C-alpha cells in the first residue's frame, strides 16, 4: 500500500496551478497594454445617426449647408461614441485617462487634427467635393493607429475605412453614399462585432 497516495496527483495539481498563473499573467499584460473600453454599442448608435445625415446632406444644393450637416453629425456621432466608451470603461474600472487610454487617444488624434486642417483648407479653396474621401481615409488611418492599443478588430475596421475612402476619392461615386457606407454601415457592422465579442 502506498503510504502517500496524495502524491500521485501532485504533478497534475502543480501543472494546473502553473497554467492558471500563466493565464493570469497573460490577462494582466493584455489589460496593461490594451484599452478594452471601446464601446461597440456606441459605434452602432453613432452609425445610425450617419445614415439620415447622409440622406439630408445629399439633398443640399449649397456647399455650406452640406458641410454644416456633416459637422453637426461629427459632433453628434463623436459624442455618442465617446460617451458610450467612457461609460463602458468606467464599468470595467478603467478610464480614458489610464495609460492604455491615453496611448489610444494620442495615436488617434494626429490624423484627426490633420483632417480638421485639410477640411478648413478645402473649404476656403472651394474643394469640398473632395472631403468625403479625405475624411474616410484619415479616419481609417486614425482608427488603425489607435487600434494598436485596443482590441484586435479595431485596426481591421480602420482598414475598411481606408478602402472606403480610396473608393470615394478614385471612383465616380457619390461622396454622401460613401460616407453613409463608412460612418454608417461600417460603424454599425463593426460595432455589432465589438458589442457581441467584447461587450458594451
Image (cartoon, rainbow, N blue to C red):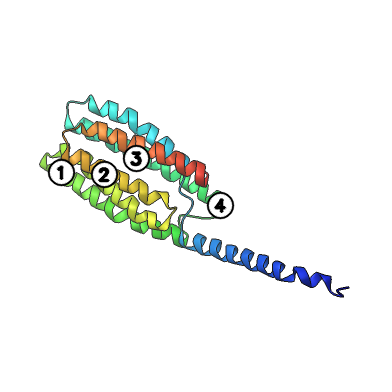
Q: Identify the residue at image location x=30%, y=48%.
A: 140
Give residue 6's quadrant in the image. Answer: bottom right
Dot 2 crowding, Cα within 10 Å, few <14, some 14–19, many 20+: some
Element carrying mark 1: helix
Left or right: 176 as drawn, with respect to 196:
left
Give residue 106's quadrant in the image. Answer: bottom left
> Badge 2 is on which residue?
163
The mark that comes first in sequence, 3 or 2, is 3
Residue 75: which disc?
3
Of the residues tagged 1 and 2, which is closer to the observer? 2
Dot 1 crowding, Cα within 10 Å, few <14, some 14–19, many 20+: some
Q: Position of residue 9 (x, y in %)?
A: 75, 68
**Which of the pair 31/50 is nearer the observer?**
31
What's the CA distance linking mark 3 and mark 2? Answer: 24 Å
* Residue reaching furthest to the bottom: 3
The mark that comes first in sequence, 3 or 4, is 3
Of the residues tagged 3 and 4, which is closer to the observer? 4
The mark that comes first in sequence, 4 or 2, is 4
> Badge 1 is on which residue?
122
Element carrying mark 3: helix
Q: Identify the residue at image location x=33%, y=30%.
A: 51
Of the residues tagged 3 and 2, which is closer to the observer? 2
Amino acid at each position: 500500500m502506498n503510504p502517500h497516495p496524495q502524491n500521485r496527483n501532485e504533478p497534475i495539481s502543480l501543472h494546473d496551478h502553473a497554467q492558471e498563473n500563466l493565464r493570469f499573467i497573460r490577462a494582466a499584460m493584455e489589460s496593461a497594454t490594451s484599452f478594452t473600453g471601446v464601446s461597440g454599442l456606441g459605434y452602432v448608435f453613432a452609425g445610425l445617426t450617419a445614415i439620415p445625415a447622409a440622406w439630408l446632406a445629399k439633398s443640399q444644393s449649397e456647399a455650406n449647408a452640406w458641410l454644416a450637416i456633416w459637422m453637426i453629425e461629427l459632433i453628434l456621432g463623436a459624442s455618442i461614441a465617446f460617451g458610450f466608451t467612457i461609460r463602458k470603461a468606467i464599468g470595467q474600472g478603467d478610464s480614458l485617462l489610464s495609460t492604455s487610454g491615453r496611448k489610444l487617444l494620442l495615436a488617434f488624434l494626429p490624423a484627426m487634427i490633420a483632417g480638421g486642417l485639410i477640411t478648413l483648407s478645402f473649404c476656403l479653396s472651394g474643394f469640398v467635393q473632395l472631403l468625403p474621401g479625405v475624411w474616410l481615409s484619415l479616419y481609417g488611418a486614425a482608427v488603425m493607429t489607435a487600434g494598436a492599443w485596443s482590441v484586435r478588430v479595431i485596426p481591421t475596421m480602420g482598414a475598411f475605412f481606408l478602402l472606403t475612402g480610396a473608393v470615394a476619392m478614385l471612383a465616380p461615386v457619390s461622396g454622401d453614399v460613401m460616407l453613409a457606407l463608412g460612418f454608417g454601415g461600417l460603424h454599425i457592422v463593426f460595432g455589432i462585432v465589438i458589442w457581441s465579442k467584447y461587450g458594451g
